[in-house]
Image (cartoon, rainbow, N blue to C red):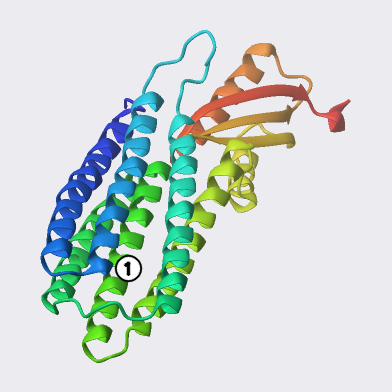
Amino acid sequence: MDIYDDIRKGERGAWVSITAYLLLSAFKLFSGYWFASSALLADGFNNLTDIVASVAVLVGLRISQKPPDSNHAYGHLRAETIAALVASFIMAMVGIQVIITAVESLFAGQKGTPDVISAGVALVCAAAMGGVYWYNRNLARRINNQALMAAAKDNLSDALVSVGAAVGIIGAQFGLPWLDGAAAIAVGILICKTAWDIFRDATHNLTDGFDEGELSDLKRMIARTEGVESIRDLKARVHGNHVLVDVVIEVAPELTVIQGHAISDRVEEQMRKMKNVMHVHVHVEPSSNGI
């Protein structure tokens, strides 16, 4: 199977996000001006910023499909992880801006009561963005794509921002303008937390970090392979949505080169049965127990 098939599927999710942000930002900005809702206007401008994050994800997915070359022997798959990292920075800036704006609104006090219809607009937009989040999250899980999952979390953050805008608008109708700021601060903190989670995972993968539990699973599978007496060393790293494995195994010292090579082939075959293992490098050493 072509290793780039899943990445091409991920592009659909990025395009869904970009299209949704374009349509919803235009709808929110028009409605914000028409119904005199500053919260809805701010939400619309926030969506314009999110278009940049979605475009960054799309660009990362496109670059990751470039085949290996003289400078990138394993291909360009890590571009999608870099795209997730860029998206985390953009989300963090949006979250910080939401918090700053909310604090300023709390000190500024009520500036006017927006039309209650604008709250309905915000909730409709929140539901639409929630649908985009659901689509991208499920697609990202199915194809194991970190960049698209970052885009999905950004979609969820925007849905929550719209809910916060609706809360503020409704609160203004009852003379409780502080609800807007309180909801916005909570949403801003949540956006920053999500951005940190994406940043942590992306930097972990870019610095060749690998989950110890998954490494133990690889080790157990290799140890069960016929002919493998012990495992001297095992390393693995994430390359985009795939895994690269390097292992040093020990075999009986009296085996011929051909027999040792056959064991190596069996190890590679077992490893490739595991999801997303793209490349396996097996080094064979004679067992010290038989020397």
Residue at x 53% of width, y 15% of height:
73
Q: Is residue 117 left or right of residue 14?
A: left
Horizontally, is 220 left or right of 76 in the view?
right
Q: Position of residue 137 (x, y in %)?
A: 32, 54
Percent position (x, y) of residue 187?
A: 41, 70
* Residue at image point 17% right, 55% down: 24
**Is residue 229 at least partly visible in the picture?**
no
* Number of marks in picture: 1
Against 231, residue 263 (above or below) is: above
> Would you say residue 38 is visible in this rendering?
yes
Please state which amino acid type lies under the numbered disc 1. Leu
Residue at the top extreme of this rendering: 70
Q: Residue furthest right?
A: 291
Residue 233 at x, y percent in the picture:
74, 34
At horizontal 32% and vertical 83% (from top left) the residue drawn is 177
Q: Quadrant of the C terminus?
A: top right
The quadrant in which residue 34 appears is bottom left
Quadrant of the rendering where the N terminus is positioned: top left
Q: Secondary structure at mark 1?
A: helix
Quarter where residue 159 is shown: bottom left
Q: In the image shown, does 5 or 179 lie closer to the viewer?
A: 179
In the figure, residue 208 lies in which quadrant? top right
Q: Residues within 10 Å of mark 1 (few under 14, many from 20)?
A: many
Residue located at (22% from left, 49% from top): 21
Residue 252 drawn at (x, y percent)? 75, 26
In this view, the residue farthest toward the bottom is: 174
- In the rendered image, which residue does mark 1 sit on? 160
Using the image, determine if residue 175 lies above or below residue 289.
Answer: below
Q: Is residue 47 above or below residue 112?
A: above
